[in-house]
Amino acid sequence: QVQLVESGGGLVQPGGSLRLSCAASGFTLEHYAITWFRQVPGMEREAVSCIGFSAGSFFYTDSVKGRFIISRDNAKNTVYLQMNSLKFDDTAEYYCATDSFCPGGSWYDPRLVESWGQGTQVTVSS
């Protein structure tokens, strides 16, 4: 079964850190760029960060620059999103998806993603 599985979310206080994982199952992740998205109920899904298939390119939305770090371990078929200095506004369900480039078409239009995983919930609360 071809799928991406997100994990690592949880409840954290403001200023805390979490590391999300996006693990591929049934295919090789190294041939794809990966984009992390997040969504708050009632809001549109937004792109947060992406990494190119060679890990040579990165992209971050302005609100997370300097706080989030994206990386990949192709040997583990996994992409990570290290989230530091978390803020209340980072609370959301986080998803990952494949794309051809970083940033790719899905960065600008998440509707281009054909299949979504179950996501992982990040809650920043005191």
Image: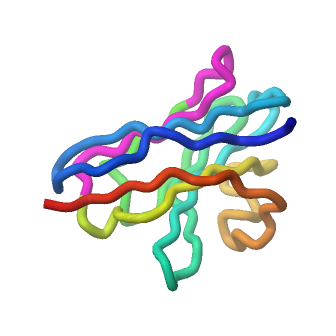
Q: Image check: 83 left or right of 81?
A: left
Residue that appears at 51% across and 85% down: 42
Q: Image check: 3 left or right of 69?
A: right
Q: Is residue 17 above or below residue 48?
A: above
Q: Where is residue 88 in the image (x, y as percent from the top left)?
A: 25, 66
Residue that appears at 72% across and 35% down: 53
Q: Image check: 84 left or right of 53?
A: left
Closer to us: 99 or 24:
24
62 magenta-colored: no
Closer to us: 8 or 103:
8
Residue that appears at 67% across and 44% down: 34
Name the image quarter holding the C terminus.
Answer: bottom left
73 magenta-colored: yes
> How many dots with numbers?
0
Q: Where is residue 29 in the image (x, y as percent from the top left)?
A: 75, 31
Q: Position of residue 18 (x, y in %)?
A: 33, 41
Color encoding of the figure: rainbow
Name the image quarter holding the N terminus.
Answer: top right
Q: Image check: 26 left or right of 91?
A: right
Residue that appears at 72% across and 57% down: 116
The image quadrant of residue 95 is bottom right
Q: Where is residue 44 in the image (x, y as percent from the top left)?
A: 57, 79
Q: Which range is magenta?
A: 72-86
